[in-house]
Amino acid sequence: MDLLADPYRLKVTVQPYMMARIVDLYDFIKRYPFLTDIQPIRLAVSDATLPANQGIWSLTRHNGQVTLNRVSDQLTGPADIQLTIQQLTTACFGTQSLARAYQHGLITGDVNAINRLDTSLVKERPALIDYF
């Protein structure tokens, strides 16, 4: 601010140009650093780009051991949480909590399951640095 004669004439904008995406849901979840154990939760994950990610998945974490099994490749079965791969990505990367996504109508499901999963996710935002 001290370097400019009139710093208030500047217009500062933020333009996002990078995107994170879960490419292999199974591998990502198996490696994800969950903070707490998770009682079994069924996730109905939709992914229009990669059919291998789409379906209903059963997720548990017990004594640090993560188990993720695909129950169905369809989205029509019973699930505790219904969300897109993008919403799951933003939650896992600390950009937006699942509770907030639920409040805004971006995901649907059982509030208790959403909160249980949400408390086990890392809340620290990653840094995507594209320069050296």
Image (cartoon, rainbow, N blue to C red):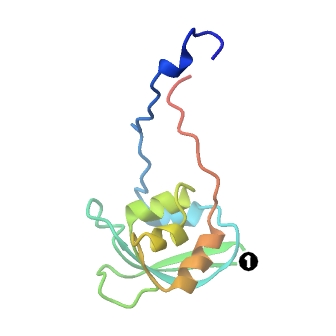
Q: Residues within 10 Å of mark 1 (few under 14, many from 20)?
A: few
As drawn, the residue found furthest toward the left would be 48
Q: Vertical placement of 40 versus 65: above or below? A: below
Q: Looking at the rendering, in which quadrant would you find the C terminus?
A: top right
Q: Secondary structure at mark 1?
A: loop
Residue in the picture at 58% in, 75% down: 117
The foreground one among 79 and 4 is: 4
Q: Position of residue 101 (x, y in %)?
A: 47, 68
As drawn, the residue found furthest toward the bottom would be 78
Residue named by callout 1: 63
Q: Position of residue 112 (x, y in %)?
A: 57, 85
Quarter assignment of residue 83 = bottom left
Q: Is residue 73 left or right of residue 22?
A: left
The three-letter amino acid code for the residue at tag 1 is: Asn
Residue in the picture at 66% in, 12% down: 2
Q: Vertical placement of 14 versus 82: above or below? A: above
Quarter assignment of residue 36 = bottom right
Q: Looking at the rendering, in which quadrant would you find the N terminus?
A: top right
Residue in the picture at 31% in, 65% down: 47
Q: Vertical placement of 5 versus 101: above or below? A: above
Residue in the picture at 42% in, 39% down: 18
Q: Position of residue 29 (x, y in %)?
A: 53, 65
Quarter assignment of residue 45 = bottom left
The foreground one among 123 and 14 is: 14
